[in-house]
Image: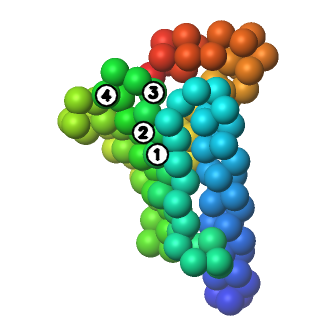
Amino acid sequence: MFLRLAHQHRQFVQDLVMNLQALAVVLERRGYPASCYTCGDQMNSASFMVSLGDNHLIRFLVSDYGITWTEMRDDRELMKLEGAEAISQLDDLADLVKQSMQTDTGSKTLAKKY
C-alpha cells in the first residue's frame, strides 16, 4: 500500500510540475515575466515565479517535501499558503489566465484579482 501511495505522490508532483511549466509559458506569452525551473530530468520539484507588475510577485514551490504559494509586494510577504490551499490559489490564477484569454483583457483581469 505505501509503495503505491509513494508512486501516486511522485506522479502527482510530476503532473503539477508539467502544469507549472505550461502556465509559465502562457503567462510569458501574455506579457508577464514568468519562469518555472526544475531540478534534473525526473521533474520531482519546481520553482515557479510570476511578476504581476508594481513589485507584485507570486512564487509557487513544489517538491517531495511540500507545496507552498507565497505572494509578495514590495519585497514583503503578503500571504503564504501550503498544501491544498496553495494548489487552490494556483488554480484561481490559472482560471484568471483562461478568462483573460477569452475576454482578451489580459493584464487588467489579473491585476484586478491580485
Instruction: Indicate the colouring scheme.
Output: rainbow
**Residue position for label 2:** 58
Q: Amino acid at mark 4?
A: Asn
CA distance for labels 1 and 3: 10 Å
Seen in the image, is 74 located left or right of residue 45?
Answer: left
Seen in the image, is 72 located left or right of residue 50?
Answer: left
CA distance for labels 1 and 2: 6 Å
Mark closer to the chain start, 4 or 1? 1
Secondary structure of the residue carrying numbered label 2: strand
Query: Looking at the rendered structure, which numbered label has been put on residue 52?
Result: 3
CA distance for labels 4 and 1: 13 Å
Q: Amino acid at mark 2?
A: Ile
Seen in the image, is 114 located left or right of residue 23?
Answer: left
Q: Is residue 48 visible?
A: yes
Q: Of tags 2 and 4, which is closer to the observer? A: 4
Secondary structure of the residue carrying numbered label 1: strand
- State yes or no: discs 1 and 2 in contact (Cβ < 8 Å): yes
